[in-house]
Amino acid sequence: MFKKILIANRGEIACRVIKSAQKMGIKTVAVYSDADAQALHVQMADEAVHIGPAPANQSYIVIDKIMDAIRQTGAEAVHPGYGFLSENMKFAEALEKEGVVFIGPPSGAIEKMGDKITSKKLAKEAGVSTVPGYMGLIGDADEAVKISREVGYPVMLKASAGGGGKGMRIAWNDEEAREGFQSSKNEAANSFGDDRIFIEKFVTQPRHIEIQVLADKHGNCVYLNERECSIQRRNQKVIEEAPSPFLDEATRKAMGEQSVALAKAVNYTSAGTVEFIVDGDRNFYFLEMNTRLQVEHPVTELITGIDLVEQMIRVADGEKLPMKQSDIGINGWAIESRLYAEDPYRGFLPSIGRLTRYRPPVEGKTQAGGIVRNDTGVYEGGEISMFYDPMIAKLCTWAPTRAEAIEEMRLALDTFEVEGIGHNLPFCAAVMDHERFESGNITTAFIEEEYPEGFEGVTLSDDILCRVAAATAAMERVAEIRRTKISGTLGNHERKVGKDWVVSLQDQDFKLVIQADKQGSTVVFEDGTEMRIESDWTPGDPLAKLTVDGAPLVLKVGKIPMGFRIRLRGADLKVHVRTPRQAELAQLMPVKLPPDTSKFLLCPMPGLVVKINVSEGDEVQDGQALATVEAMKMENILRAERKGRVKSIKAEAGASLAVDEIILEFE
């Protein structure tokens, strides 16, 4: 077995690989850029080598710099993680030439399957059902428009060397095909050093289901069931689960056997993933093969008990697979929520900054018998950079059934504390409560269909509101008693804490009475409904873990005048807890209106201005492109929301802007 391996990656996947290597007694080498000098993967590894400036194209994807790090440290093998150089044939060849083992497939398989154009041709030749499209190289935007018309709109423009949603655009007409072609080429060049683009038919109402395969160097190959990855935004996955709630055993077997046949046809070894789109009749079509470890591999590990990273290392060392296809089962259900540094209230645009608070839920077995796992690459006090992918953690839960796994995820998301940056925890929580997700009736269009105007938070049900009202009333009583004791020591007499309260939240008022005892409180509502509250919450704690009528309730807590800022289940609430007289007077207070920003184009996220599309004095139309801003390797085109005239331009190409900084002003 290898004595030392180098991880040619960063962030949570580098940390993930280090954990398996440590378990196997293998020493690890991390590489890092200027931006990652204090990163978690650098701290976890036995050695670390600096490889250059922050931009990935000057550090993490420069093959010569990785090779230099290998020579400096004497690493015998390299695990590439995903992204960066993980599917780069030239990198695999460079390692072979150096006599260093690549913990992944042979360079020939990467060449055949890693290139999406070639892989589709090979799949078609092998009799695999594929999506209609144009697999040749496309020279310019005019040719892209011509091909798109021939294939038939809608079409998807994809980077040949792409992955993770980078270099991918959906076009519904000629204009979008033209714009999408250029943006896809730019993103592909920046992310992968390869700007080739191909076009395929975009299948509407599809499910994205993928098969995990694992093959050794002795001709053995198995499939480890499927993963459902249909909850996506910007063609990038947000929620994954294993198994799929849609597949039956016959379809699973057919997809798995086809995936294994394809892997064997190209002499594949190591872990790989064959991706399909599946229609409502369970017809499946080959999309691509990812010749690497997938981001969502933990859900497969949780339902099979197989450590995929460990098996990749063992296969690379020449060992045979320890399992046969008949040994692979499905144990329970697993769900993964990707925690991204992005703002779901602003169209999932990236966010950067310092993690002033980062407290994931406790990993391991839960009180209900499930499992919580959190793969992460950050820590409290660390910086989220604009240079890399915005994913900072993968929160996973396991339980015997899908419904129980969802419930475990709800509690885990409510327990996860993140402050200092915009993040998508509220959106992930909203998905867990969505009736379509609960029923398993999902497609890749889920976000577009259910949030057509964007994510605007969650309106909680009356049942949950009552539970929150009862809990916060009990919490306010505890806080008031504490304040009374403090003020009582300063004055001549002690204030008494009353029993009658009015809780206002989400435009509703709940009148209630609190009957407290040593074990907790009984809250009685105006209609006679009673709820029993038990908790050890202390005023000032940012997380309150309570039981309401015996059921768990977890609240993220912040203080506001006469109440709390409460976050749970995707909702962000101002909860006011007042005496009846205070509630009466509060009705007379005027409402403060937000400032009018309708005449400005504001930068929606921290980023770099790539292009200004208009000039001062220009008339613009609804939907017209105004500017392009790049952040975290993604180009974002900002468009006019209505007709108007440009009065002045406040930013220029090359400028770095903060959130809500003015780009231009309208008359």
Image (cartoon, grey):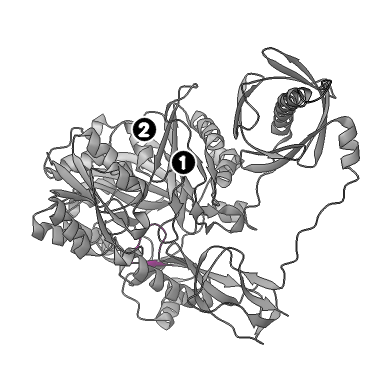
Name the disc covering residue 620, or none. none
Image: 626 above or below 283: below
Residue 58 point in image, percent of width and height: 30, 67
- Would you name the residue on which mark 2 appears? 303
Mark 2–mark 1 Cα distance, whole angstroms, equals: 17 Å
Tell me the SS state at disc 2: helix
Image quarter in which the C terminus is found: bottom right
Residue 564 point in image, percent of width and height: 71, 37
Residue 481 picture quarter: top right
Q: Which of the marked residues, 2 or 1, is nearer the chain's N terminus?
A: 1
* Magenta range: 157-166
Image: 326 above or below 81: above
Residue 106 point in image, percent of width and height: 16, 54
- Would you name the residue on which mark 1 appears? 246
Amino acid type at mark 1: Phe
Tell me the SS state at disc 1: loop
Image quarter in which the N terminus is found: top left
